[in-house]
Protein backbone atom coordinates (compact mmCIF):
# COMPACT_ATOMS: atom_id res chain seq x y z
CA UNK A 1 0.00 0.00 0.00
CA UNK A 2 1.37 3.42 -0.96
CA UNK A 3 1.94 6.18 1.57
CA UNK A 4 -0.87 8.19 -0.01
CA UNK A 5 -3.29 5.30 0.37
CA UNK A 6 -2.20 4.73 3.95
CA UNK A 7 -2.78 8.39 4.69
CA UNK A 8 -6.26 8.24 3.18
CA UNK A 9 -7.11 5.16 5.17
CA UNK A 10 -5.72 6.56 8.41
CA UNK A 11 -7.63 9.79 7.90
CA UNK A 12 -10.87 7.93 7.27
CA UNK A 13 -10.47 5.65 10.27
CA UNK A 14 -9.42 8.55 12.51
CA UNK A 15 -12.44 10.54 11.44
CA UNK A 16 -14.80 7.69 12.23
CA UNK A 17 -13.24 7.14 15.64
CA UNK A 18 -13.33 10.81 16.45
CA UNK A 19 -16.95 11.20 15.41
CA UNK A 20 -18.32 8.01 16.95
CA UNK A 21 -16.24 7.11 19.96
CA UNK A 22 -13.67 9.80 20.46
CA UNK A 23 -9.93 9.28 20.50
CA UNK A 24 -8.49 7.39 23.46
CA UNK A 25 -5.90 9.32 25.42
CA UNK A 26 -2.67 7.83 26.72
CA UNK A 27 -4.20 7.63 30.19
CA UNK A 28 -7.17 5.68 28.83
CA UNK A 29 -4.84 3.27 27.02
CA UNK A 30 -2.84 2.70 30.21
CA UNK A 31 -6.06 2.22 32.20
CA UNK A 32 -7.26 -0.36 29.69
CA UNK A 33 -3.89 -2.15 29.81
CA UNK A 34 -3.99 -2.20 33.60
CA UNK A 35 -7.48 -3.70 33.49
CA UNK A 36 -6.30 -6.48 31.18
CA UNK A 37 -3.29 -7.21 33.40
CA UNK A 38 -5.56 -7.41 36.46
CA UNK A 39 -7.81 -9.92 34.66
CA UNK A 40 -4.76 -12.02 33.78
CA UNK A 41 -3.51 -11.97 37.38
CA UNK A 42 -6.94 -13.01 38.67
CA UNK A 43 -7.13 -15.96 36.27
CA UNK A 44 -3.54 -16.92 37.06
CA UNK A 45 -4.37 -16.91 40.78
CA UNK A 46 -7.47 -19.07 40.26
CA UNK A 47 -5.62 -21.54 38.05
CA UNK A 48 -2.78 -21.60 40.57
CA UNK A 49 -5.26 -22.73 43.22
CA UNK A 50 -6.46 -25.42 40.83
CA UNK A 51 -2.85 -26.36 40.11
CA UNK A 52 -2.20 -26.82 43.82
CA UNK A 53 -5.13 -29.23 43.99
CA UNK A 54 -3.69 -31.48 41.26
CA UNK A 55 0.01 -30.86 42.01
CA UNK A 56 0.43 -34.11 43.94
CA UNK A 57 -1.10 -36.43 41.29
CA UNK A 58 0.88 -34.53 38.65
CA UNK A 59 4.07 -35.09 40.65
CA UNK A 60 3.33 -38.80 40.92
CA UNK A 61 2.46 -39.01 37.22
CA UNK A 62 5.75 -37.37 36.21
CA UNK A 63 7.79 -39.76 38.33
CA UNK A 64 5.99 -42.76 36.82
CA UNK A 65 6.82 -41.67 33.25
CA UNK A 66 10.11 -42.07 31.41
CA UNK A 67 12.88 -41.45 32.20
CA UNK A 68 12.10 -41.92 35.91
CA UNK A 69 9.77 -44.92 35.32
CA UNK A 70 8.73 -45.00 38.98
CA UNK A 71 12.19 -46.18 40.06
CA UNK A 72 13.83 -42.85 40.80
CA UNK A 73 14.25 -41.98 44.49
CA UNK A 74 14.30 -38.24 45.14
CA UNK A 75 15.69 -36.64 48.29
CA UNK A 76 15.17 -33.32 50.05
CA UNK A 77 18.06 -31.28 51.41
CA UNK A 78 15.99 -28.51 52.95
CA UNK A 79 12.75 -28.21 54.91
CA UNK A 80 11.36 -26.03 52.12
CA UNK A 81 12.15 -28.37 49.21
CA UNK A 82 8.78 -30.12 49.25
CA UNK A 83 6.78 -26.89 49.44
CA UNK A 84 8.90 -25.28 46.74
CA UNK A 85 8.40 -28.14 44.27
CA UNK A 86 4.69 -28.28 45.09
CA UNK A 87 4.33 -24.61 44.18
CA UNK A 88 6.51 -24.90 41.07
CA UNK A 89 4.37 -27.69 39.66
CA UNK A 90 1.19 -25.76 40.45
CA UNK A 91 2.58 -22.63 38.76
CA UNK A 92 3.59 -24.50 35.59
CA UNK A 93 0.12 -26.05 35.36
CA UNK A 94 -1.47 -22.65 35.92
CA UNK A 95 0.66 -21.03 33.19
CA UNK A 96 -0.29 -23.67 30.61
CA UNK A 97 -3.97 -22.96 31.21
CA UNK A 98 -3.48 -19.18 31.43
CA UNK A 99 -1.56 -18.76 28.16
CA UNK A 100 -4.70 -18.77 25.95
CA UNK A 101 -6.36 -16.26 28.28
CA UNK A 102 -3.30 -13.99 28.03
CA UNK A 103 -3.54 -14.14 24.24
CA UNK A 104 -7.25 -13.35 24.43
CA UNK A 105 -6.68 -10.34 26.67
CA UNK A 106 -3.99 -9.09 24.33
CA UNK A 107 -6.46 -9.36 21.46
CA UNK A 108 -9.09 -7.43 23.42
CA UNK A 109 -6.55 -4.70 24.14
CA UNK A 110 -5.68 -4.16 20.47
CA UNK A 111 -9.20 -4.88 19.15
CA UNK A 112 -10.34 -1.21 19.04
CA UNK A 113 -7.50 -0.43 16.62
CA UNK A 114 -8.50 -3.22 14.21
CA UNK A 115 -11.01 -3.23 11.39
CA UNK A 116 -13.79 -5.86 11.57
CA UNK A 117 -12.06 -8.22 9.12
CA UNK A 118 -8.80 -7.88 11.07
CA UNK A 119 -10.63 -8.69 14.29
CA UNK A 120 -12.11 -11.84 12.77
CA UNK A 121 -8.77 -12.96 11.34
CA UNK A 122 -6.87 -12.45 14.60
CA UNK A 123 -9.31 -13.84 17.18
CA UNK A 124 -9.21 -17.31 15.63
CA UNK A 125 -5.62 -17.73 16.86
CA UNK A 126 -6.64 -17.66 20.51
CA UNK A 127 -7.98 -21.26 20.77
CA UNK A 128 -4.83 -22.65 19.15
CA UNK A 129 -2.61 -21.14 21.84
CA UNK A 130 -3.45 -23.96 24.26
CA UNK A 131 -2.90 -26.61 21.59
CA UNK A 132 0.53 -25.25 20.68
CA UNK A 133 1.48 -25.03 24.36
CA UNK A 134 0.53 -28.67 24.89
CA UNK A 135 2.41 -29.69 21.74
CA UNK A 136 5.53 -27.90 22.92
CA UNK A 137 5.17 -29.35 26.39
CA UNK A 138 4.88 -32.89 24.99
CA UNK A 139 7.90 -32.45 22.71
CA UNK A 140 10.00 -31.06 25.57
CA UNK A 141 9.01 -33.71 28.10
CA UNK A 142 8.89 -36.86 25.97
CA UNK A 143 11.75 -36.10 23.55
CA UNK A 144 14.20 -33.50 24.84
CA UNK A 145 14.12 -34.19 28.57
CA UNK A 146 14.85 -37.96 28.31
CA UNK A 147 17.82 -37.19 26.05
CA UNK A 148 19.20 -34.64 28.49
CA UNK A 149 18.54 -36.83 31.52
CA UNK A 150 20.13 -39.89 29.92
CA UNK A 151 23.20 -37.93 28.85
CA UNK A 152 23.85 -36.52 32.32
CA UNK A 153 23.48 -39.95 33.94
CA UNK A 154 25.88 -41.46 31.38
CA UNK A 155 28.50 -38.85 32.25
CA UNK A 156 28.04 -39.51 35.97
CA UNK A 157 28.48 -43.27 35.49
CA UNK A 158 31.59 -42.74 33.35
CA UNK A 159 33.09 -40.67 36.15
CA UNK A 160 32.22 -43.32 38.74
CA UNK A 161 29.94 -40.99 40.65
CA UNK A 162 27.22 -42.23 43.00
CA UNK A 163 23.92 -40.68 41.95
CA UNK A 164 21.80 -39.05 44.65
CA UNK A 165 18.96 -37.02 43.17
CA UNK A 166 17.51 -34.06 45.02
CA UNK A 167 13.87 -33.27 44.28
CA UNK A 168 14.67 -29.57 43.72
CA UNK A 169 17.56 -30.31 41.37
CA UNK A 170 15.51 -32.82 39.40
CA UNK A 171 12.55 -30.51 38.80
CA UNK A 172 14.73 -27.45 38.23
CA UNK A 173 16.45 -29.44 35.51
CA UNK A 174 13.08 -30.53 34.11
CA UNK A 175 11.49 -27.08 34.11
CA UNK A 176 14.59 -25.42 32.63
CA UNK A 177 13.97 -27.58 29.55
CA UNK A 178 10.20 -27.77 29.17
CA UNK A 179 9.31 -24.13 29.94
CA UNK A 180 11.48 -22.47 27.23
CA UNK A 181 10.47 -25.02 24.59
CA UNK A 182 6.78 -24.74 25.48
CA UNK A 183 6.94 -20.95 25.10
CA UNK A 184 8.86 -21.22 21.81
CA UNK A 185 6.08 -23.40 20.37
CA UNK A 186 3.82 -20.36 20.69
CA UNK A 187 6.02 -18.55 18.15
CA UNK A 188 3.87 -19.26 15.03
CA UNK A 189 0.74 -17.98 16.74
CA UNK A 190 2.53 -14.93 18.09
CA UNK A 191 3.91 -14.12 14.64
CA UNK A 192 0.50 -14.54 13.03
CA UNK A 193 -1.11 -12.33 15.65
CA UNK A 194 1.51 -9.59 15.25
CA UNK A 195 1.08 -9.82 11.49
CA UNK A 196 -2.69 -9.54 11.81
CA UNK A 197 -2.34 -6.30 13.78
CA UNK A 198 0.30 -5.05 11.28
CA UNK A 199 3.31 -5.00 13.59
CA UNK A 200 5.21 -7.69 11.64
CA UNK A 201 5.13 -8.96 8.08
CA UNK A 202 6.93 -11.75 6.16
CA UNK A 203 9.32 -9.27 4.55
CA UNK A 204 10.68 -8.23 7.94
CA UNK A 205 10.79 -11.83 9.13
CA UNK A 206 12.86 -12.91 6.12
CA UNK A 207 15.31 -10.10 6.77
CA UNK A 208 15.58 -11.31 10.39
CA UNK A 209 16.14 -14.95 9.37
CA UNK A 210 19.88 -15.08 10.15
CA UNK A 211 19.39 -13.49 13.55
CA UNK A 212 16.45 -15.82 14.26
CA UNK A 213 18.49 -18.91 13.32
CA UNK A 214 21.32 -17.78 15.56
CA UNK A 215 18.92 -17.17 18.46
CA UNK A 216 17.27 -20.56 17.98
CA UNK A 217 20.67 -22.26 17.93
CA UNK A 218 21.75 -20.53 21.15
CA UNK A 219 18.50 -21.52 22.88
CA UNK A 220 18.84 -25.10 21.64
CA UNK A 221 22.42 -25.38 22.93
CA UNK A 222 21.54 -23.86 26.31
CA UNK A 223 18.63 -26.20 27.09
CA UNK A 224 20.21 -29.46 25.89
CA UNK A 225 23.19 -31.54 26.96
CA UNK A 226 26.55 -30.57 25.44
CA UNK A 227 26.45 -33.13 22.65
CA UNK A 228 25.89 -32.53 18.95
CA UNK A 229 22.98 -34.97 18.51
CA UNK A 230 20.83 -33.47 21.26
CA UNK A 231 21.51 -29.95 19.99
CA UNK A 232 20.42 -30.87 16.46
CA UNK A 233 17.27 -32.64 17.70
CA UNK A 234 16.15 -29.41 19.39
CA UNK A 235 17.53 -26.77 17.00
CA UNK A 236 15.96 -28.24 13.85
CA UNK A 237 12.35 -28.17 15.21
CA UNK A 238 12.89 -24.60 16.44
CA UNK A 239 14.09 -23.48 13.02
CA UNK A 240 11.17 -25.30 11.39
CA UNK A 241 8.85 -23.42 13.77
CA UNK A 242 10.32 -20.14 12.59
CA UNK A 243 9.88 -21.05 8.94
CA UNK A 244 6.29 -22.08 9.62
CA UNK A 245 5.83 -18.71 11.29
CA UNK A 246 7.16 -16.93 8.19
CA UNK A 247 4.86 -18.96 5.93
CA UNK A 248 1.80 -18.32 8.09
CA UNK A 249 2.68 -14.64 8.30
CA UNK A 250 2.80 -14.58 4.51
CA UNK A 251 -0.70 -16.04 4.29
CA UNK A 252 -2.06 -13.38 6.64
CA UNK A 253 -0.13 -10.62 4.88
CA UNK A 254 -1.47 -11.66 1.47
CA UNK A 255 -5.05 -11.40 2.72
CA UNK A 256 -4.25 -7.98 4.17
CA UNK A 257 -2.94 -6.75 0.81
CA UNK A 258 -6.05 -8.03 -0.95
CA UNK A 259 -8.26 -6.35 1.64
CA UNK A 260 -6.31 -3.09 1.35
CA UNK A 261 -6.58 -3.12 -2.44
CA UNK A 262 -10.33 -3.65 -2.21
CA UNK A 263 -10.64 -0.87 0.37
CA UNK A 264 -8.65 1.52 -1.83
CA UNK A 265 -10.90 0.79 -4.80
CA UNK A 266 -14.00 1.51 -2.73
CA UNK A 267 -12.48 4.65 -1.22
CA UNK A 268 -11.29 6.01 -4.58
CA UNK A 269 -14.69 5.25 -6.09
CA UNK A 270 -16.38 7.51 -3.58
CA UNK A 271 -14.12 10.48 -4.39
Image: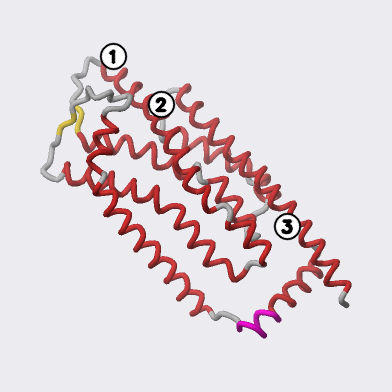
* Quarter that holds the N terminus: bottom right
Residue at image location 42% in from the left, 71% down from the top: 34
Q: Mark 3 vs mark 1: which is more N-terminal?
A: 1
Residue behind mark 1: 158
Q: Against 269, is 217 above or below?
A: above
Secondary structure beneath disc 2? loop
Q: Position of residue 170 (x, y in %)?
A: 26, 33
Residue at image location 58% in from the left, 42% down from the top: 212
Picture quadrant of residue 226: top left
Residue at image location 58% in from the left, 67% down from the top: 111
Could you classify mark 1 by the number of other residues whose Cα lies within 10 Å: few (under 14), some (14-19), or many (20 or more)?
few
- The stretch in magenta equals 15-22
Residue at image location 47% in from the left, 47% down from the top: 130
Q: Against 243, is 111 above or below?
A: below
Of residue 34 and residue 117, the one placed in the foreground of this image is 117
- Marks 3 and 1 in Cβ contact (< 8 Å): no
Q: Position of residue 156 (x, y in %)?
A: 27, 20
- Number of the label disc, if any, that sits on residue 226: 2
Left or right of 68? Residue 201 is: right
Q: Position of residue 242 (x, y in %)?
A: 59, 40
Q: How far apart, in angstroms, are the residues tagged by discs 2 and 3?
A: 44 Å
Q: Position of residue 36 (x, y in %)?
A: 44, 67
Secondary structure beneath disc 3? helix
Secondary structure beneath disc 1? helix
Residue behind mark 3: 256
Picture quadrant of residue 224: top left
Amino acid sequence: MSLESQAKRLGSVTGKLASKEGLMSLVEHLTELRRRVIYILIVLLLTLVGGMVIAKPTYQFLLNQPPANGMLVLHTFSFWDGIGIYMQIALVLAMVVTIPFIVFQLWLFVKPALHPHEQRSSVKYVPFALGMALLGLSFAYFVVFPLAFGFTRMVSRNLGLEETFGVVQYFDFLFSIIIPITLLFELPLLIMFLTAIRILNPIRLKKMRKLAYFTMSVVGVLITPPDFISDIIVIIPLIVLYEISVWMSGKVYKKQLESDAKWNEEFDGKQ
